[in-house]
Image (cartoon, coloured by chain):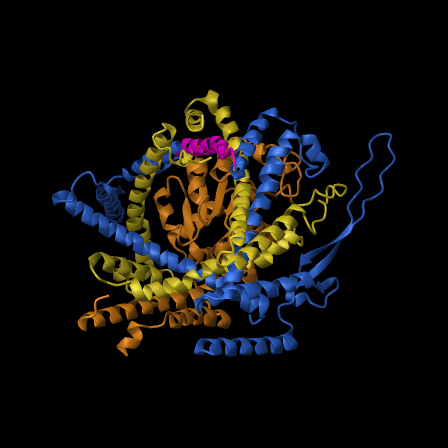
Chain colours: A blue, B yellow, C orange
Amino acid sequence: MNRATVIWGMLLIAGAAYLLVRVQSVGNGRVYVQRVEVQPQAAPPAEGEAPAAAPAGWVRYEPALRSSAGEEDIEVSIPRTVGVWLAALLTLCILSFLWGDNPFYKLAESVFVGASAGYAMVVGFWTGIVQNLFGKLFPELMRASFLPGQEGEGSLVYIVPLVLSVMMLMRLSPVGGWISRWPLAFFIGATAGIRLVSYFKSDFLLQIESSIVPLIVMTDGGLNWQESLKNITVTVGVLSCLVYFFFSVEHRGAAGVASRLGIWFLMITFGAGFGYTVMGRIALIAERLQFLFSDWLWLI
Amino acid sequence: MKRTVPLFIAAITGFVLIAADFVPYTQSWGDTAMIWFDILAAVAFILGGANLLRMHLQKISDVRPGWGYSVVTILAFLVTLVVGLGKFGVHPAEDFPNHPWSGDYIAHGGGFWWIYEYVYLPLAATMFAMLAFYIASAAYRAFRAKNTEATILLATAFIVLLGRTYAGVYLTGNLPESLAWLKLNYLTDVIMNVFNLAGNRAITIGIGLGVVALSLKVLLGVDRSYLGSDREA
Amino acid sequence: MYEFFAHLDRRWIFLLMLLAVAVPLLQGVRFPEEPSDMVRNVYAAMDESSRGSLVLMAFDYDPASQGELQPMAAAFTRHAALRGHRMIFLTLWPQGVPMLRRNIDILKTEFPDYVYGEDYVNLGYRPGAEGVIKVVVSDLKELYASDVSGTSVSQLPLTRDLKNIQQVDLLVNISAGTPGAKEWVQYAATPYRIPMVAGTTGVGAPALYPYIPQQLVGVLGAIKAAAEYEQLLIGGYPVLAENIQAQEGLKRMGPQLVAHLLMIVLIIAGNIVYFAGRRRGVTR
């Protein structure tokens, strides 16, 4: 048995013992919910028809605070409690990669990949396919089944995206996969079309316009040196960075000086970016630890 | 047929959408094209899921190393899919109690919501949170003041890291008014609003021109890489 | 000694980072925040909009970035409700649907007078990324025929007469990447001159500065800006001082400070080791 296994084993045993004691003493990880009876109203009868019987009701569970335990209608939710424990376990499985690659991490990673793809597929189906495609192609059928609240008439023009969709799925077929190039071409063409205009306007023309600023700013008849310095620095910075990006001239002489200045501006930009990235990443781990300490262990 | 038609489709779609921005008469054509685009985006999710399934089934069938994890991936995929498509544990929408399938697919308390909340969320959040540790390790091992450029980058990072927490106020908050410009939070604002603005504006302009050029190449049929090779079935 | 630090096992660094975040979190360390001009501008855009303004809350983020962005999204939601604005929620991220609900739950629990359908509507998600923006700027109902509960948007008082999102008074976007703030600027705020504010991750914030102020009123960058926004909110609406849920960003600034200091110490230590190695003739 190597040293790492011993350390892992001891850590796991200590952790399990701590959890056992804590669960016994405070019952951490439990999730409380409020029981709400839902009794839907029967739809108003049409003229000349007898009123329909009220549909059967059901129970809805709303999240409740830990502090509300013991109050009326507040109960422990078994599925959600199991969920919190599972979430904590999966969090620890991923974190275990910090020690080194291991089967727990690989297991959690595999679940993540599968669940992500399944999630995206389900959401895409109910929103894009059912609501936006079937809802427009077969409105009556959808109103009778999934989308009773949907209004409007059908439109035959939606046959085109239906056909394109089927063509796209042909990519999965062992033969005739080339037909999926047609919807792909539509997709690529549309992306290129909207990006060409938007990038040209928003990221080129307007950026140039925003850079054309007075280098000497006068306010109330006097020199506003702060604004002037800012505008001069921004203008010099943008121009020198652009010189650095321009590879059609050799970076020598004046172009060399400008491009070097451009590199310095970019270094400051990347330094700021690094600082902000660090800030972001730390916020993410803080949130995860907060989940473990608060929702699972009830330490805070 | 296999390559020429797609080129025409891409060009016509792209130019219609460009025209839609300039010619009011064609605006509705552009809108229609974008609605079709959005539907195809949903189909892309289905294609992605099916591809994942095919890839992992192949791995299992070939008994390649790590095939057991592919079984887990497929199980997680199928469970999520079945629970989500079957609306397990979802009650009808309260306004439409007579339509059992009318409930929100990700309704609070439902099966799909449970998978999201207690499986997907912790895995996704922790996966990205791990980067905090690796960025710390990289800072120790790779962030060296080897030359002027690296030193500038490092100094900027120091100022921003301090200036974006209470440390900046604590360390330099008591500086006299004449030296107020040296306050770390003020310096951070200057870095972000002046130097970062200049650098990122140049990058934005560069990327903007790049995207415009690439889009034109695609629409004019100069760039055909998205069609793949001729050998594809 | 040199050898130990030159070949330091990175797991020691991981442990230090874990402690730097965990200990202040457990201790509940907090610090006062001094809002920057950028955060003040964003706050003013929401606060100075006339009461009852129509605000589009486009929350494009997922669990992977909720640690950074949820406090921001919650602060924007509370602020809009405190100002009496009407809100339309939507997301371009499939994983963003439950994130929208987290913020709508704030309205349900803290603002019981807010009525669904009249004061706020949850439109949920539609696939298409920037393609969705391109459609909703000209015809909202073409893509969003119904809300997340399946109710037709033509039946809801708030959206009944809403043709497209050009009619909104303010566009609030929380963005974890693509599609996100950049796309909303490109396809909505810029062409239709819709006033827009954004809240983004630390990675994304610096790249949005070129759009300010002409195309974007301002941007909240990462958790620090969220904490400053919360501080401003508490100052403007003292009722929130009692609400611990409204101080998530402020709570996180304790671990943030210690971890930032650790990063600086690590960089300095790394450089000391590097220069000591150079003096010894080690080239790495």
- The quadrant in which residue C33 appears is bottom left
Which of the two residues, C253 or A214, is positioned nearer the viewer here? C253
Left-right relation of C235 to A204: right
**Magenta highlight: main SS:** helix
Instruction: Write the residue at 70% across / 31% down.
Output: A140
Is residue C233 in sight in this rendering?
no
Residue B28 in the image, given as x and y percentages of width and height: 51, 24
Instruction: Write the residue at 56% across / 66% down.
Output: A89
Q: Is residue A182 magenta?
A: yes
Residue that lies at the very extreme toward the top in this rendered image: B25
Instruction: Write the residue at 23% across / 60% down.
Output: B151
Q: Tag count in the figure?
A: 0
Residue that lies at the very extreme toward the front in this rendered image: B62
Q: Which range is magenta?
A: A175-195
Q: Name the quadrant of the C terminus of chain A.
A: bottom right
Q: Is residue A247 magenta?
A: no
Which of the two residues, B184 or B1, is positioned nearer the viewer here? B1
Is residue A257 in sight in this rendering?
yes
Residue B18 in the image, given as x and y percentages of width and height: 41, 27
Q: Is residue C127 above or below residue B53?
A: above
Left-right relation of A169 to A64: left
Residue B203 in the image, given as x and y percentages of width and height: 31, 44
Residue C156 in the image, given as x and y percentages of width and height: 65, 37
Left-right relation of A130 to A100: right
